[in-house]
Amino acid sequence: MLNVLWVLLIGYAAGMVLPLYPRQLNTQSLTASICAIVATCAGIALGLLGLIAPEPVTLSIASTVPLLTFAIRLDPLAALFVFTISLVGLAAAIYAVGYVRHFQGRVSVAALGALFNGFLLSMTLVVLADNGLFFLMVWELMSLASYFLVVTEHEKADVRPAGFFYLVMTHVGTAFVVLTYLILFQSAGSFSFDAFRHPEQALPEGMRTLVFLAALIGFGTKAGIVPLHVWLPYAHPAAPSHVSALMSGVMIKTAIYALIRVYFDFLGGQFPWWWGFVVLLAGTLSAILGVMYALMEHDLKRLLAFHSVENIGIILLGIGAGMIFHTYGLNEFAALGLLAGLYHTINHAMFKALLFLGAGSLLYATHTRNMEEYGGLLRRMPWTGLFFLIGAVSISALPPTNGFVSEWLVFQTLFLSFQLPALFLKLMLPIAAALLALTGVLALACFAKAFGISFLALPRSAHARHAEEVPVAMRIGMGILALLCVGLGLAPMIVVPLLDRITAPLTGVSITDKVLALDGWAVAPGDVQFSSISPPMLAAMLILGGLLGLLLAFLFGGRLMTRSYKTWGCGINLSPRMEYTATGFVQPIKRVFSTIYQPTIKLETEFLQKSRYFAKQRKFEFHIEPVFEKYLYDPVIHIFMRIADRLRILQAGSLHLYLAYIFVTLVILLLFAV
Amino acid sequence: MSPIIQSLLLVTAQVIVLLTVSPFLVGLIRKVKARFQCRQGASVFQPYADIAKLFRKQPVISTTTSWIFPATPYILFASTLSAGLLVPTFISQTPLNFSGNIIALVYLLALGTFFLILAGLDAGSAFGGMGSSREAIVASLTEPAMILSIFAIALTAGSTNLSTIVHKTALLEGIATDPSPHLMALAALFIVALAETGRVPVDNPATHLELTMIHEAMVLEYSGRYLALIEWAAGLKLAVFLSLIANVFAPWGIATTLAPTAMGIGLLVYAVKIAGLAVLIGVLECMFAKLRLFRVTDLLGVAFILALLGLLFFYILRS
Amino acid sequence: MQISPHTGSQLVDLCSALLLLTCFAIVAQRRLSACVDLFALQSAFLVLTAAVVAFLTGNHHIYIAAALTGVIKVVIIPRVLKKVIERLNVKRELVMNVNVPAGLLICGALVMLAFFITQPIIPLGFLLTRDSLAIALAIVLIGFFTMIARQKAVTQLVGFLVMENGLFLGATAATYGMPLIVELGVFFDVLIAALIAGIYTNRLQDAFDNVDTNHLTVLKE
């Protein structure tokens, strides 16, 4: 297994260096992609081997820096994330071969390819690291690599502030992550993860709470849980689309990995009920607000970024419910919650990456991210359209795709709350389930909008009219993920036992036999009589039902030719301006949930001079209030700006003064040393 | 008879029952409404003739559409029928019980809704888009209430699988065990059913006025066999919800064994129950006017609160 | 005729649940006359509850209270209110201080609150049923909320009457009814209050051509 690991490390390392040498732009990107493909294939193998290996594999290289060892440990939890990262990485690497052409001549393709490999390597090492300092190093590398990827198109004005915002937010998060590890280090006396697990003296209760909160804030910033999500809708759209796919699909998941690692592994799963409740609350809030803000977006990539917030929320709902059950010793249900969360983690990685790649294809073909300028693309880009549709169905959790199975498992976990002893939680978990249902159906509305406005009806702009299907490499990249979306939905009997290998050590019980029934053909948490679904059976029912429809149409009607005719446009020829827009589509939702959106609508009309009844032009403006930015972030930024203003006195611009500062500091330090 | 063949036969029987009964329900509601408006009204069997006629007509497809448009009727028909197979009709134990519980049913119906919304947008006319947009908001408001009311029912029976719920309650006293939570969940689910099947006061299936239609606006461009399938699927959805309400809240008389007499009685009782519910819907449609779209929130808010109260009462009574 | 205590308490539960349901219907209803009808329905359920309690406990004076409720709250007060509405020509409440869905959610939270507050009392065991007291408290709270949320004087009055219904339910379910003389006093108070409020609404109409109580703010000048 170590050989595979070396292939992975060398592959990425080569990918970080080799693309910088060739002169030919095409060769540069091809080299980067080939290196990444080799490494990710190794990663997929490594992940699978790690999932079925009986014992965790470790590798440790000592360093000269005290407390730091380059320690790597591949246990099932890490293996799952290595697998997911590599799988999405593979699709993105293949996709990049075609997609990067779009950047040639504008930005350095070589640097893009090298950073892409570096980003994948750092993510893989984050989940493999077995030493706190090493983890922090690669965590920081991951943040920096993604920052440089976000600002790839730095010549665009809106990209630079997005990148800066991301850099600031991610470092605020990192500060809390460092705090988490320092507290753990204090009791363990070493940065090795093994020492974290079995500290010399147990952490006092207050410190444990601090670890919980610091980890939630620190990793939550990376994961994008509300209200720490504000950077996502800026950074993800700014990055090149195959990088957005990685960021949204897997990078934010490393935070989920780290949360599970800290709560269940380091802290041994010993926590009061309110920890789980806080996580559940954060999950519910993220899910509902994420989808609500996504609905109002007409920039396709921003829309997808907000959906990442939503799905992180769904994952946290599963994990939070699992934590609550764990507190009360209901370990089977705890395992189910974790399993549901992890299942959704892989699924979200697949469909979100697919959707971002699809959005990239639209950007590639039309050079715009604005949905109002798309339209009619399904006829022009049939493959992209099909793959995007599969992604949209998956993210809307509709059967028989993967999103449905994992969301269903989250529902079941929440429904099992009737076994809890506390009345408060018994009521809160079903309410969370109801809000999850609202989230699910709003996601459905949102993707009906995203797909319907972008791909159906008439083209709304010249860009869309002249769109062509994207190159083969990009289609293959999307196709792999689309197949996985369907496959992961139809084959829970393969996925569940693998996930069980992760949750069993964390919760102490193996639940494969309990979750799978009828030789794996049905998923039935607890008991077939309580609840069960059989995704293969549902798929079969749907196909047979469709065939029955065809048969009935043939039996009653015989073979009839259809006639084509233009849509009736109330007597005038149909034009794109008569179609429903994305803004119009969500107007009722905006109005019903106006309490949340706080919309400001401005309509100015200039009338013709001859008559008050004919408008010369109308100006319509509509904004929704960015509540968190306005009431949470702006005041904080304001305070910092004022402090910075005061501190400006120190900055005189004189070299002598700066030397004096250093001198004084040195003297003070020497005095302390005495 | 081997169990597999027996299951296959039962599934076929269920498909036939659902397909035959659904146009009848639509016809019955129309008849009741006509009589209340002092009209003779068409025969209750008129919808059968309508569907048969539509199948024989040549369909017209808009030139602006993609493959989504002709595929949607089949997907809608398949998803609604699949949902129907999860609901017990005349026997309490459906053979496909294992393949999906009540949440799967909700999501199967959502699959049909998703494609119908897409089809509404596909033809490019403003009517279709308007219908789709409205359907999206109505669906969003319905779902939470539906999930909560379902959960309140599931708690009493200790199961979320429909067959198990019905079988257990049929063998016990039915809803008499916990009247108040059940009553609230029933009221909530009934409102949800009205909204989901596009009946008054949420939507009006008889209208073609652009300001008021929701479902009709989405399917405005359909004709021929596509329209036939969509109409049939709409009837099926009604049958699914009526069967759900009838059998979950009043499972009396349903066949709990596979004995021929029990099944015969079950079939008869089932027909009476859903016909009764259809008449009730017809009467309600005559009593109430359609609500404005933005007043639908009030109604569905009531459904949500009712379901929540049902849950609360269940826990309080059992604690 | 004998009814088992279990069935009896379930019957009371069911009746009080119906009372609560009508409360929510009132909160969701915008039409004034329908609000009054719903209040009459709620009072009818209250009569039923009181009668069942009277039958179960054998306290015959509750029958008298029930009959009085029937006469005053199901017949007289709704009639007076209907007259007022007819004269005022106000059909529905267009603007509310809290919109209906939000109001429903708040009322749902109020019910939960009521349940949590009364939780410690249930084990004491003197209550006839588990949740009637909680429902009574919830009805009082919702009535109070209606008075805050609505702008028209008539619906505010309905809110007040709903509160009174809640109190009566609490008194019957928790303590098997107050002494008859107290009940009689309360009934006359309510009747007089309703009549006075009816007159006051009429005066409001005369003074402002409107029954919107927001206009009362003008009086301070």
Image: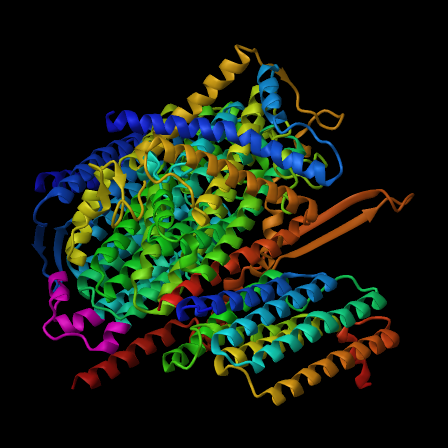
Say if the magenta span includes residue A197.
Answer: yes
Give the magenta part as a residue range.
A183-209
Query: Which residue is pictured at 7% across the width and 49% down the height?
Result: A55
| Residue at 13%, 52% in the rendered image | A72
* Quarter of the image with the N terminus of chain B in it: top left
Above/below status of A512 relative to B86: below
Task: Give the left or right position of residue A673, taking residue A570 as reference.
Answer: left
Decide if residue A281 is on the left or right side of residue B65: left
Camera-side residue of B175 and C112 = B175
**On screen, B22 above or below A620?**
above
A639 sits left or right of A623 in the view: left
Residue C58 image point, x, y percent: 50, 79
- The answer to which image quadrant residue B302 occupies is bottom right
Magenta segment: does it hold A58? no
Question: x and y percent of residue A402 in the render?
Answer: 34, 39
Q: Is residue A66 toward the left or the right of residue A171 in the image?
A: left
In depth, the one of C182 and B133 nearer the eye is: C182
Q: Position of residue A369 (x, y in %)?
A: 52, 39
Q: Nearer the viewer, residue C219 or A466?
A: C219
